[in-house]
Image: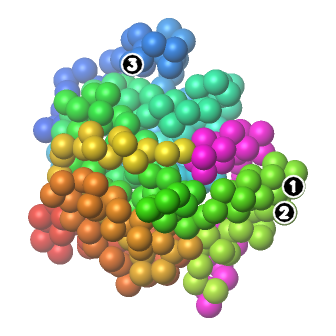
């Protein structure tokens, strides 16, 4: 997938549903920022900036699909047709990823996960989204937590796909990596991004018997500007969002894979324990990207959580 941004100026795309207000398509991207120091310039075209795509059932509940580091909305392409009959699907690219507007890149903004949360909230404001079901992959799961904490009225549920609030091990916490491991990973990424991508993509994806999956992730990494990727990588792998998990008050699904070197099962258990009432589902899947390696299982788990018959 990765289609051109939907022509939301058509009368059909501006139809109001239960999660789309009557101001959708009215140029809300020109409003002031959500948080001091994290604002967008007046007049910013959010639809173009974040390459927004809207598809699926016009009057369905809204799923906002957010990709992880080194990826873009194309990573959801196998899940989208499985959910489009029941949900209104909103996809986008973070600034610096995919087909977003590279001229909107700001190193200061995107050196913090709060900057990516601002992208999420800008998209919600632009489309006047309410009762949003946020589906975040990898680091985007934590971005969703931050966005929901800032504007809780926007969000009704969270779906966290292979989440990790902290990648570095600490006393009493296993994130999957030692501090030296992350240091070497970032050094390798910064010195030879293309080489790092080729080496790491198959490891992250897993599924050695399906090399085409690792090749696809490598292509996604390689399509990202190395300088922007360097900032996003540091923001991702050095983050610690464990305290923010305490702010979650909406029903939450934690989706983990049976084998995942980036977010081992101890991390899924930690996230589940930290969010009261959350549901933990372990997919019969390998690797860090179940939306690609096991799209049917991923879609079924999301639909079951949202009580949609399959």
Residue 254 located within the stretch drawn in magenta: no
Judging depth in this view, the residue of 186 and 291 nearest the camera is 186
Quarter of the image that includes the C terminus: bottom left
Residue 195 horizontal side relative to residue 181, left or right: right
Residue marked by disc 1? 192
Residue name at image x 66 percent, y 48 percent: 233
Residue marked by disc 2? 195
Residue 108 horizontal side relative to residue 44, left or right: right
Q: Quadrant of residue 262?
A: bottom right
Farthest right residue?
Answer: 191
- When the figure is inspected, residue 125 is found, relative to residue 208, above or below; the finding is above
Judging depth in this view, the residue of 52 and 241 nearest the camera is 241
Q: Position of residue 29 (x, y in %)?
A: 42, 19
Q: Position of residue 109 (x, y in %)?
A: 58, 25
Q: Which residues are magenta?
A: 209-238
Q: Is residue 22 visible?
A: yes
Element under disc 3: loop
Report if the CB atoms under discs 2 and 1 are less than 8 Å apart. Answer: yes
Residue marked by disc 3? 34
Residue name at image x 49 percent, y 59 percent: 171
């Amino acid at each position: 997938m990765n289609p051109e941004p939907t022509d939301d100026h058509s009368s059909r795309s501006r139809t109001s549903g239960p999660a789309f207000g009557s101001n959708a398509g009215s140029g809300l991207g020109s409003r002031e920022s959500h948080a001091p120091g994290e604002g967008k310039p007046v007049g910013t075209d959010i639809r173009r900036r974040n390459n927004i795509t809207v598809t699926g059932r016009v009057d369905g509940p809204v799923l906002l699909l957010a990709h992880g580091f080194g990826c873009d909305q194309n990573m959801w392409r196998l899940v989208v047709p499985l959910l489009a009959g029941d949900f209104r699907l909103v996809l986008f690219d973070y600034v610096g990823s995919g087909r977003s507007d590279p001229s909107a890149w700001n190193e200061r903004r995107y050196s913090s996960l709060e900057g990516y949360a601002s992208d999420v909230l800008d998209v919600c404001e632009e489309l006047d989204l309410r009762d949003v079901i946020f589906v975040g992959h990898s680091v985007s799961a934590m971005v969703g937590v931050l966005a929901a904490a800032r504007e809780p009225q926007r969000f009704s549920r969270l779906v966290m796909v292979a989440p990790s609030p902290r990648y570095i091990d600490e006393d009493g916490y296993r994130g999957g990596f030692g501090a030296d491991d992350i240091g070497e990973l970032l050094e390798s990424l910064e010195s030879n991004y293309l080489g790092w991508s080729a080496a790491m993509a198959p490891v992250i994806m897993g599924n050695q018997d399906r090399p085409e999956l690792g090749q696809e992730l490598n292509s996604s990494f390689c399509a990202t500007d190395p300088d922007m990727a360097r900032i996003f990588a540091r923001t991702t792998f050095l983050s610690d969002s464990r305290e923010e998990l305490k702010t979650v008050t909406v029903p939450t699904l934690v989706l983990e894979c049976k084998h995942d070197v980036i977010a081992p099962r101890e991390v899924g258990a930690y996230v589940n324990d930290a969010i009261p009432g959350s549901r933990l589902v372990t997919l019969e899947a390998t690797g860090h990207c179940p939306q690609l390696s096991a799209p049917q299982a991923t879609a079924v788990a999301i639909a079951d959580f949202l009580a949609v018959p399959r």
